Image (cartoon, rainbow, N blue to C red):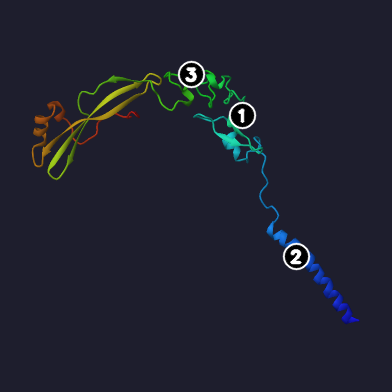
Amino acid sequence: MNRRFSVLAFCCLALMALTTAPATAAKAKNPPADRIPTKLINPDDPREPALNLCGSVCSSGTPCDSCRTAGGLTTTCGQFAGHPANDLDGDGVVDTNDNCSCAANSNQANCDGDAYGDVCDFQDNSWKLITTGTQHCYLDTDNHTFNTTLEFYYQNVYKSSCTGQTCYQKYLRGSVSCSTGSDLFQCCQNKWFAPDCGGVWNQDQCGLPRCAF
């Protein structure tokens, strides 16, 4: 009896193994999805990383940054914030007439009169030359094996019509070469404008701040 029961049990186990093997193999071949499900972008959730890119109007530059919504569609950050499609920064000026389409500026202020409004302008184009350099502000000596080079730096002074700020444009006006061991002051007077040879040498006395252009 026991032997007959043992044989029956063995047959049942073998049959179970045969029926579950394909399912197990299929499961191994196609494991259950463990990917994090696509998260809906929630502009009200401060933990949502996309909020940093799309939850507010772009600060500068064109075109506006873009983000991908859960539906797979791309939208500008302005639209993501709920602004009209033709007014991405929501300032009441349609993009075709807006000199800063990604940064709100309802007054459209544009001091230097270029293509960009003040709030998104990357360069001040209102600088005007107010003083032209007439003598050196830096006389630099560079010693070489067989000669010494004297470099004369002048400066022009500019003023911004927009901000009233002044800047100094330092530039190399010219240079002369003097033989090693020679009297540099005399060489300077012989080869350059004599007034530029006086004063302090090797100390940059050109004005600050320097112009960025």
Q: Residue 166 appears at what percent x and percent y?
A: 34, 23
* Residue ID for mark 2: 21
Compare marks 1 and 2 and give the one earlier in the sequence. Answer: 2
Residue 144 in which image quadrant: top left
**Distance (Cα) linking label 3 and label 1:** 23 Å
Earlier residue among tags 3 and 1: 1
Mark 1 residue crowding within 10 angstroms, few (<14) / some (14–19) / many (20+): many
Taking depth in this image into account, of 117 and 3 the one nearest to the observer is 3
Quadrant the N terminus occupies: bottom right
In the drawing, what numbered circle is on residue 79?
1
* Amino acid type at image mark 2: Ala
C-alpha gap between disc 3 and disc 2: 74 Å
User: Which numbered tag is attached to residue 109?
Assistant: 3
- Which quadrant of the figure has residue 136? top left
Residue 28 point in image, percent of width and height: 69, 60
- The x, y position of residue 165, in whole percent, is 37, 23
